[in-house]
Amino acid sequence: MNKTIYLDNAATTRTAKEAVDAMLPFFSESYGNASSIYKLGADSKRAVNEAREIIARSIGASPQEIYFTAGGSEADNWALIAAAEACETKGKHIITSKIEHHAVLHTCDYLEKRGFSVTYLDVDENGLVRPDELEAAIRHDTILISIMFANNEIGTLQPIKEIGEIARRRGILFHTDAVQAYGHVPVSLSEYPVDMLSASGHKIGGPKGIGFLYIRQGVKIRSFIHGGQQERGRRAGTENVPGIVGFGAAAGKAMDTLSERVEKETGMRDYLIRRITQEIPYCRLNGDRVKRLPNNVNVSFQFIEGESLLIMLDMKGICASSGSACTSGSLDPSHVLLAIGLPHEIAHGSLRLTLSEENTTEELDYVVETIKEITDKLRRMSPLYEDFIKKNGENRQG
Ligand SMILES: *Cc1c(COP(=O)(O)O)cnc(C)c1O
C-alpha cells in the first residue's frame, strides 16, 4: 500500500467536504463582519446563527447557551477559570481526575497557584472515575467538578450521568470536557446533567481553531475575552465566521451519521483489538473493554519503545500515536497510562490507533500485519526481550 492510512483521529480529523464547501464563500464573497448591519454583514450573521442552532440541537441545548471559542482548550480554560473566579466567595476547592486532558490539568495547576485547592481523583485500572470516591472528595468549600466525558488516550467513557447527578444534588457546578465524545457518541443534555461542556471542531471533521463552550442558562460565570459584545458579551472578538460555519456543517453531518458510524467504528475497533491482542504476544489492551469510544484502540507491547514503533509505522504509511499528540515528543510516559497503573516501561511501549468511518478492513489487515512485523523486528533487537526469552521460552502469552 502506498497511500497514507490515517489512524490518528483523536489528534485531529480530515476536514469533511461538507465543512469545506460550507466555509468557502465566507473566505471570498461573503466576507462581512457578522456585527455589521448592512446585508453583507447580515449574511455572515445568519450563517453564524444557523451553525449555532445546529450545534445547540446536537446536544439538546438552546442556541443562547452555546458560546463559540477558538477550540477545545479555550473552552476548558474558560470553564474552569471563570467558574472558579465566579464562585470563589463560596469556596476554593475543585475536583477533577488524574487523566484529564492537559487543557484541564494545566489550568488546574494555574488555579492552584492562584490559591485554589484541587483534588485529582484516581481512576481504576480501566481509567474509570468512581462516583462514590468523587462524592467522598466533596468538601463544604467545593465549587466545581470537572470530569472528561471520554478520555483522549484510552477512550474510556466516564459515568457522566452519575457524576452529574451527584454534583447537582450537592449544588456544585459540573463541567465536562466532551471534546472526544461530541460527535462520536450521543451527548444529550437530557440524559447528562451538566452545567458546562467543551467541544472542538477539528475532532469531528470541522476546521481547527474553533470550538464551543455550552454554559447552561442561569450559570453565572465571568466573560473570558474582554472587548466587544460578541457571544452575548462573554467572549469578545469578531466571530470566526468560516470556522463557525464549517463547525456547524461538520456537526450537522456528524449527527446525521452518528448511529451508523458508531456501529461501523465499533466493529472495526473490536476487529483490531481482537487481532492485535490475539496475534501479538506480550500485549495488553488499555482502557475499558466496553465503556469505550467506538473508534479507540490503545495497546501496550512489552519490550517495545513506542516512539520507534511510531517511526517505523510512519515509514509504512501509517499515522498513529503513542499517547496524546501533546505528550509525543517528550520522554515522559503518558500521565493517563501511569494513572491506570502501568509501569513506566510498559507505558512507553504503547500505541493509540483511532479510527474514522473512512477506514477499510483492507487497511486494518495491513496495519495488523505491519504491527506484527515491526514488533517482532524491534523485539529481536531488544536485549531485555532476549533475556526474557532465555528465561521463559518463546511466545508465551504475557
Ligand atoms: C483535542 C482535545 C482538547 C483540545 O482541543 P483543541 O481544539 O485542540 O484546543 C481538549 N480536550 C480533549 C479531551 C481533547 O482530545
Image (cartoon, helix red, strand yellow):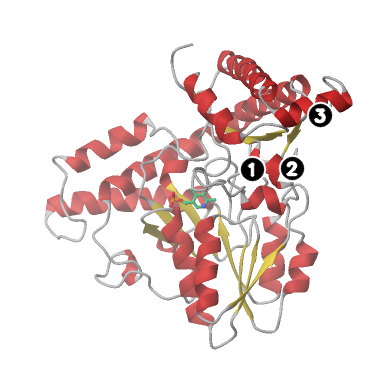
Quarter assignment of residue 246: top left
Residue found farthest to the right: 392
What secondary structure is found at the residue carrying circle 3? helix
Q: Which residue is mark 1?
A: 155
Question: What is the spatial separation of the Cα atoms under label 1 and label 2, in whole angstroms?
Answer: 8 Å
Q: Tag on residue 288?
A: 2
Q: First in sequence, mark 1 or 2: give its number.
A: 1
Q: First in sequence, mark 3 or 1: give its number.
A: 1
What secondary structure is found at the residue carrying circle 1? loop
**Nearest the eye: 58 or 281:** 281
Q: Which residue is mark 3?
A: 388
Quarter assignment of residue 185: top right
Q: Which residue sits at x=67%, y=47%? A: 337
Q: Which residue sits at x=47%, y=42%? A: 203
Look at discs 3 and 2 and give the one toward the viewer. Answer: 3
**17 relative to 26, above or below:** above
Q: At which x and y percent is residue 352?
A: 60, 35
Indicate the quadrant containing the C terminus: top left, top right, bottom left or bottom right.
top right
Look at discs 3 and 1 and give the one toward the viewer. Answer: 3
Q: Which residue sits at x=52%, y=74%? A: 111
Q: At which x and y percent is residue 55?
A: 44, 49
Q: Give the class, few, some or many, for how many residues have Cα within 10 Å of label 1's Cα (few <14, many ≥20).
A: many
